[in-house]
Image: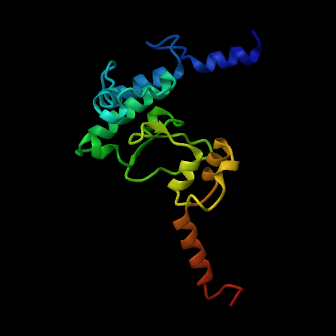
Amino acid sequence: MTYFKTKQAALQTTTAGPGFGQKKWEAQHVSARRKVNMSAKLRPWDTVRQVQPKYRGISLKCRPRVTEMINVCWFKLRSTNTKSDSRLMRDSFCNVSQSVLRFPVSHGEAPCFTTSSFLYSFEHDQIMSGASHLRGMGHPRSSMPLARFSDATCRQLSGESFSVPISAVIQTSLSLNPFGSWW
């Protein structure tokens, strides 16, 4: 076994405590579940998906870490909100590229995008595409031909750009500056 593979295996597993031999993400999820008083077997989002008519028959093809994170974040979101499940789903996102210990869930507004963001939409029951990230920032569908860019390129672009309203505020404040060299 090469040094790289040995080092990689060491980083993926914990070395002490009750979860010896457990993958690092599994230990983090156990810790996150304890923080929000969530039992180990509870899968609240999976239950919602089975009850909602529009999700029946849809299987979300995700890795176990992502599925577990979505369940933990839904539980956290549900425990801090009094809205019904159908209303809570609207505009609720989970950034599955983050650590579960950060509880990367938001409701009512999209979180700040990074170049490596993978947002899961509870309303649409899917990981959002890079083009969806750009549209979420206010870029209209017709502003650029997104078909010629890959999904990864659109994600990077959304992480390196400003939203349209923020760009307008910056441009307006700069153009109205009476001390600017353009006056």
| Quadrant of the rendering where the C terminus is positioned | bottom right
**Residue for point 34% across, 36% down:** 54
Name above or below for residue 172 compared with residue 59: below
**Residue for point 48% across, 28% down:** 66
Front residue (pair 177, 162): 162
> How many numbered marks are there?
0
Name above or below for residue 123 compared with residue 108: above
Q: Residue furthest top?
A: 1
Q: Is residue 115 left or right of residue 136?
A: right
Front residue (pair 178, 136): 136
Q: Is residue 60 left or right of residue 83?
A: right
| Relative image position of residue 163 (x, y in whole percent) | 55, 61
| Quadrant of the rendering where the N terminus is positioned | top right
Name above or below for residue 167 compared with residue 72: below
Q: Residue furthest bottom?
A: 183
**Residue for point 67% across, 84% down:** 180
| Relative image position of residue 178 (x, y in whole percent) | 61, 88
| Relative image position of residue 88 (x, y in whole percent) | 30, 45
Front residue (pair 121, 22): 121
Front residue (pair 17, 59): 59
**Residue for point 31% across, 28% down:** 44
